[in-house]
Amino acid sequence: MADGSFVSPLGPGLAKLLELFGTRLAEVKFPDVDATLLATDADAARQSATDVAAARSAHLAAEAALATAEAALVERERALLLRAQRALAYARVFAADDAQLRAELDRIALPSTESGTSEATTRSLPGITFRKRARPRKPRGETQLPSASQELAQACAPEAARSTA
């Protein structure tokens, strides 16, 4: 390991020691420690760091793929539920003259789409059209209550100014 390019998570001290054992201390041997053993350990650590980075990248990619798949599942389940609710409603109208079929349909309970389904999400579902259901706005009356600042100004005004107003 002649190049000092090893960046250690243990800090710059290890990199400097590896550099010294790769150059000036290359011929020095201690029990269980020499330049070759240190270089081998450094290469193994480099490979492990590379493996960890690759695994981390794969993990992040897998998490992103999982999140995408889960979002698709939620949307498809919502679409299915909305279509199933329409099917049930149509079937109930169709079964108006068939008491047995109507009884079977009445025993079917589907979950509500109210919880967790935003209007923007349900309006973008393919093949399903929606109409806006809302109460008409109340007409605004001409009489408005005075604001707090108007009341305060009138209360603080001299008596003569209030009598002319």
Image (cartoon, helix red, strand yellow):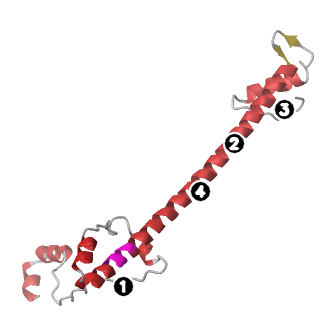
Q: Residue furthest right?
A: 27
| Sequence order check, earlier mark of 3 and 2 | 3
Quarter of the image containing the N terminus? top right
| Sequence order check, earlier mark of 4 and 2 | 2
| Sequence order check, earlier mark of 3 and 4 | 3
Q: Residue 53, which numbered label? A: 2
The segment highlighted magenta reads 84-89
Residue at position x 36%, y 85% from top? 131
User: Height in image: 22 above or below 122?
Assistant: above
| Sequence order check, earlier mark of 1 and 2 | 2
Q: Is residue 72 magenta?
A: no
Answer yes or no: do the residues labelled 1 and 2 have beta carbons within 8 Å?
no
Residue at position x 65%, y 44% from top? 56
- Relative placement, left or right, of 118 versus 32 is left
Question: How busy is the neighbourhood of tag 4: few (under 14 within 10 Å), some, or many (20 plus)?
Answer: few
Q: Residue 131, which numbered label? A: 1
Q: Secondary structure at mark 2?
A: helix
* Residue type, numbered disc 4: Ala
What's the CA distance linking mark 3 and mark 2? 21 Å
* Residue type, numbered disc 2: Ala
Task: Please tell me whether the stretch drawn in magenta is mainly helix, strand or loop.
Answer: helix
What's the CA distance linking mark 1 and mark 4? 34 Å
- The residue pinned by badge 4 equals 65
> Is 141 or 55 nearer to us in this picture?
55
Residue at position x 77%, y 35% from top? 47
